[in-house]
Amino acid sequence: MAESLNLNTLQDAVRHGAALRCRTTLQPAGGPGTKVFPPTYSGAVYATEKRRLPGSDEPVECVLLDSVQSQANRMEDALQQAVDNGRVKIPIIEVDFTSYEGDDQPEDMRLLDPVGKISSLQAPHRIADAILRDSLLGDKPFRDSEVGQRLGQVRSGDATALFELCPTALLFGMWDSTGPKGGLGAKFERAMVSEIVGINAAYGVKTSSRIDPLAIQLKAGPLFHAEGGGWTLDEAQARHEKKKPMMMGKDGRPSEANHGNIVPSLSETDRKTQQYLAGGVTIDHAEQTIVLSFPCLRRLRFPVDGECIKDRDTAAQTVLAALGICSAALAAEAGLDLRSRCLLWPTEPLTWELLGRAGEEPSELSIEAEAAVALLNDAVEEATKLGLPWQTQPLSLTPSDQLVKLVVKSQRLAVQQSEEE
């Protein structure tokens, strides 16, 4: 039976252990043998490979259902929801676009589609993202501010600024390639990785069809782009280009405006593999693997006022480990609805294995989401007692005028392109 994970166990693991790992068996929510849809990549193909697995003499066909990057984003999203609900208090930086969503703004500064607030838990490159770089802290560009300049000095031997402002960058990795140093900016590897893989995949067929209740016929066109947007049957009301009315699509078929039937058809096949493209898969099962590296955390140092203390380093490393466990537990609690037609169900509770000292048998540990939040709070309390900074309120930035204008222009182009299509 798995023991409950507590702070003392975690502290000892951070000092001497190799890793925490969690391997969970998943099945499609529809039951074994029902189809799931992996993410597609360029060319409408899936990420597939053969893997050597225990109990199998030959490599097994596997398909990626959720990548390391996507899993990190889901865990950060679970943390963001917990922050929004007041369930956890962790350091984040957010950029507030809300003041540009009203009608009182000039046209080139008025957002058509609300953006709201974007935090370092949502920005693709976390605290090093261009969205934060191109925003202001007070009246200064973020990276020119006192806080931003501290980020330019972070490294594994001095990670205190990241711990204070964006600890998830130390957990899920960061490369400060958009900062003042460009490609020479600070890099932190991922201390925590997770992925979901479908095992023994067989590829399916994607079908498409639609019956139009209006029974609009193919020859009912042609349809033209209307001068004021939308479409028209009247050439006199059509938008003109080079003195010619602009048809929708190549020949103005009603289907260009989403009217008419779609003839039942099968998806195309890949020329090399002759497999149907994006037709879903059936699998024996899926497996989620999470690994939290203690050696990666132990490489980080957290000086305060220029002084490093071993106990303080361990306390900060323990906070990061607890943050990783908390993010995984919160994401598991939220469920594994990865995308349309890819809802997975764990066939067993989330259980961790502690890989301790070399040669020791792994020990099983369990922790629910509420207990994981409490563990994080306990670890933070220990760290702050030793003088480590931990911001519990978001650091708020405002987007620069140029960034707002870029977003507004992009939104207007998207509307224009949609109308033209």
Image (cartoon, helix red, strand yellow):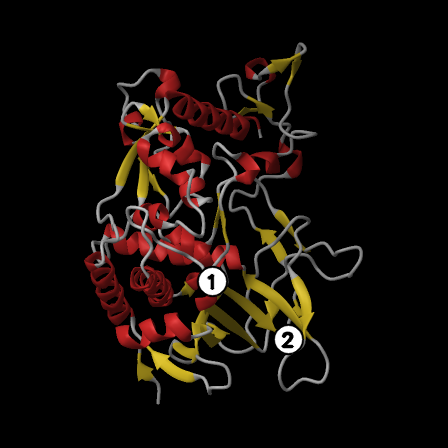
Percent from the top left, x then y, of residue 118? 35, 40
Looking at the image, which residue is at 49% across and 44% down? 186
Contact, mark 2 vs mark 1 (Cβ under 8 Å)? no
Looking at the image, residue 84 sits to the left or right of residue 420; the answer is left
Q: Residue furthest top?
A: 243
Badge 1 marks a residue whose secondary structure is: helix
Percent from the top left, x then y, of residue 140? 33, 24
Per the image, the residue denoted by label 1 is 296
Q: Which mark is residue 200?
A: 2
Badge 2 amino acid:
Asn
Q: Residue furthest right?
A: 272
Is residue 203 shown to the viewer in this render? yes
Looking at the image, residue 72 sits to the left or right of residue 334; the answer is right
Give the quadrant of the N terminus.
Answer: bottom left
Is residue 337 shown to the viewer in this render? no
Percent from the top left, x then y, of residue 381? 20, 61
Badge 1 amino acid:
Cys
Looking at the image, residue 146 sits to the left or right of residue 156; the answer is left
Q: Quadrant of residue 284?
A: bottom right
Give the quadrant of the C terminus.
Answer: top right
Count of numbered circles on the image:
2
Looking at the image, residue 393 sits to the left or right of residue 350; the answer is left
Badge 2 marks a residue whose secondary structure is: loop
Looking at the image, which residue is at 49% across and 64% down? 194
Q: Earlier in the sequence, mark 2 or mark 1?
A: 2
Q: Report, in whole angstroms, how far the alpha carbon at label 2 lies from the one at label 1.
A: 32 Å
Examine the rendered structure and indicate whether residue 223 appears above or below residue 371. Answer: above
